[in-house]
Amino acid sequence: MFNKSNYNLSFIVRASKVNKAGKAPIEVLISLGDERVVFSTGKLIAIESWNKDKQCARGVNSEAVALNEYLKSMRVRIYEEEIKLVKYGFAVTATLLRDALMNKVELVKEETILSIYRKHNELQYKQIGLGVSKGTYANSKHGLELLEKFIQERYNRNDVFLRELNRDFIEEFRVWLLTEHRLSHNGAVKYLALLKKVINRAVANNKIAFNPFANFRLERQIVSPDFLTEDELRKIINFNSPLPRLERTRDMFLFACYTGLSYIDVKTLKAEHLERDNQGRMWIKKKRVKTGVLSRIPLLPSAKILLDKYAGGETLMPIYSDKEVNLYLKDIAILCHIDKRITYHTARHTFASTVTLANNVSLIVVSKMLGHSNVRMTEHYAKLVDNCIGEEMDKLMNTYSGD
């Protein structure tokens, strides 16, 4: 059973500290035995608007009501901090109550959303290369930066206590990501999912009693990724340029079209990832940097030619930075008269759809080569191929309509 400490709490207004606007600070006075502690509430009030006997603001206007609610909540907070101190075995003093209210008592220090997000990121950083990729950590780091900016802009504060989080906070953050930061729906969902992961850990560790993400659905919109058709792929295969940067970019892109490897997996490809089996086939066997899942890819002759072309360098495939590659691919698409936005990741989509599934390679086999953790991740490409085939057949409908 909790025994309340014998302290007195009162709110006082310092008339000697009236500012130029005619307002004085409201302070908290806690006295316990011979000890007295005074500290600011952070609020100001005109002397004539203060009811000294009732220790509250006079009147029923919105400003007075809001101030009185704030002071009431501060009383409750001090009482709650007292309970925590007793629970942890402290001998309660006036100074200790003040420090606990200001979140300065380490043992009962209240967690904030940004503090636990930082701890999550610090733990993730230590696991880079051990199941966590640099890209995953970079996303978490940017997610924290976005949340910091949101709290500053929306609440004019540096942080928010976990107990303050609610459904409105999550919804406001979602809207802010979409409007102020101009993210796409899926972009906003990505950072909300990261925040949900951090909060779920706090719930599991009893840092917060209520999960603000309860019954909050995070649904990604299905976006059809661009891939090259057989005709478009052939245009890039046949593309020639006297500019070395475009030639190398074409080769790096085609290598990904023939292997399904992502940019970072091509960049980190080493001789140790190449393996020859008993039938003489050359394989790429490499764990994906992003997920750690093993990709097992038989090397097509066209991919082997590109490997041989760049043999002897510091890396197997001397690829430019991702920013440069995507810039040069834009030029190549224009020169090849391909009216489609092409990035390096388009090559991975092209391998999954045009190069493999469209040529009757089974879904399970493609899934293994792509390093997907389950076949459901690969099914999307099969639907894309079906749509492409359907669109091509639609063009023949008038020719073979039976009229």
Image (spheres, helix red, strand yellow):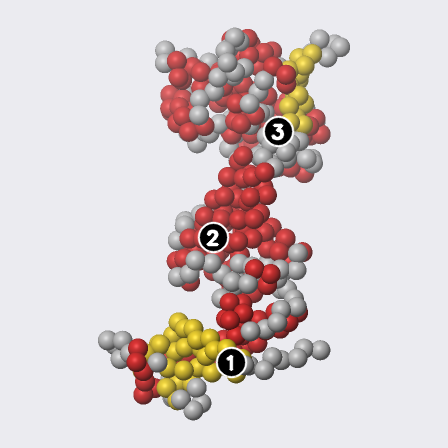
Q: Name the residue under label 3.
A: 288
Query: Is disc 2 placed on a helix, strand or loop?
Result: helix
Q: Name the residue under label 1.
A: 34
Query: Is disc 1 placed on a helix, strand or loop?
Result: loop
Q: Is residue 224 above or below residue 342?
A: below
Distance between the Cα atoms at labels 1 and 3? 66 Å
Residue 211 badge = none
Q: Label 3 crowding class (10 Å Cα cut-off): few <14, some 14-19, many 20+?
A: many
What is the three-letter code of the residue carrying label 2?
A: Leu
Q: Are marks 2 and 3 in contact (CB under 8 Å)?
A: no
Q: Nearer the viewer, mark 1 or mark 3?
A: 1
Residue 21 versus residue 91: which sits nearer the camera? 91
User: Could you say where residue 304 lies in the image, as x and y percent from the top left?
Assistant: 58, 11
**Quadrant in the picture for the C terminus:** top right
Residue at position x 61%, y 37% in the image: 127
Which of disc 3 and disc 1 is earlier in sequence? 1
Task: Residue at the far bottom: name it.
Answer: 53
Q: Are marks 1 and 2 in contact (CB under 8 Å)?
A: no
User: Could you say where residue 368 lies in the image, as x and y percent from the top left?
Assistant: 69, 28
